[in-house]
Image (cartoon, rainbow, N blue to C red):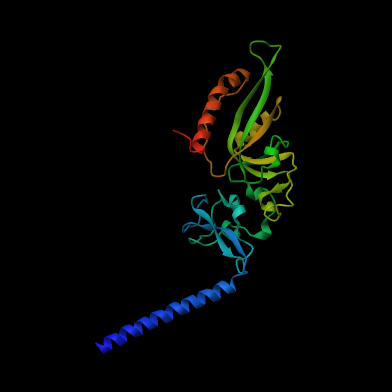
Amino acid sequence: MKQKAVLIIAIALGAAAFLLTHLYLKAEQEKLYANATKVTVVIAREDMPVGTVLTTSNTATTDFFAAGLGSDVFKAEQRNVVLGKSLEFPVRKGNPLRWHHLGTNLNQLTGLAPTVPSGMRAISIPVSGETAVSGLVRPNDKVDILGTFSFLSETNAAELETVTFTVLQEVTVLATGQETARQELAITSSRRSSSYNMVTIAVFPEEAELLAFAMNVKGSLMLSLRNPNDISTKDDTPPIDFQALQRELPRLNARRKEANRRRRGLER
């Protein structure tokens, strides 16, 4: 009985010593890292082999201590840069994504051609502040392109009719003015310029022809900015003229009112 009590006491003292040691080491670690800077970076959410296309579902963001992390990682605000790209090197779950995983490095961040997806073309369209969401469209953003055009009326050849419709949906912006996504990584937010009059986008060759025609007829193009996680598209986007505007406004206003009620949790 006495030996059993001694054994229990020894185990308890050992557990207490282990706990105290753990608490001491944890306190020392917290003191060591008290002033350490953390950086939120993009990581792999799962083990990903070569060829994996990066999406919002297989990537995530988390905090790492900046010391020893290196400068070739993608920070949280640069996540859009990797989306849609495919891996040329495998990445293990939880590891930060680095430039070499995409087959490039920080010394190769020049030129637009390498950023154009295979099978697509880069084409520039003229925009102004009001047609580019007040200059807030940035490289790697996703946009819809709206077109407004005037043409001779079918009922009265002496009159012009104006029509607006969605030309293209979910288009990737490659550059705004002379600033590409790769150049943007080296520019702090305070140095970024919202002044540009051209936006370069990635489109299929047939779409490039369509846009070339649209830019040379009487009309204008406008960008509509999308959430990067929104990949939805509409198959039925009828043209909007003055009659359609009058007809659709009541329905659209009712839909917006209902959506706002749901968003605020006021639906009954």
Quarter where residue 165 is shown? top right
Q: Nearer the viewer, residue 101 or 179?
A: 179
Seen in the picture, residue 39 relative to 167 is either above or below; the reply is below
**Residue found 60% across the figure and 51% down from its top:** 81
- Residue 191 percent coordinates (x, y): 74, 52
- Residue 69 percent coordinates (x, y): 60, 66
Seen in the picture, residue 122 relative to 10 is either above or below; the reply is above
Seen in the picture, residue 66 relative to 217 is either above or below; the reply is below
Using residue 195 as the reference point, say whether residue 209 is left or right of it.
left
**Residue found 35% across the figure and 82% down from its top:** 11
Q: Quadrant of the N terminus?
A: bottom left
Q: Nearer the viewer, residue 29 or 73?
A: 29
Q: Residue furthest bottom?
A: 2
**Residue found 57% across the figure and 64% down from its top:** 64
Quarter where residue 174 is shown? top right
Q: Nearer the viewer, residue 249 or 83?
A: 249
Seen in the picture, residue 167 relative to 46 is either above or below; the reply is above
- Residue 66 percent coordinates (x, y): 61, 66
Q: Quadrant of the C terminus?
A: top left
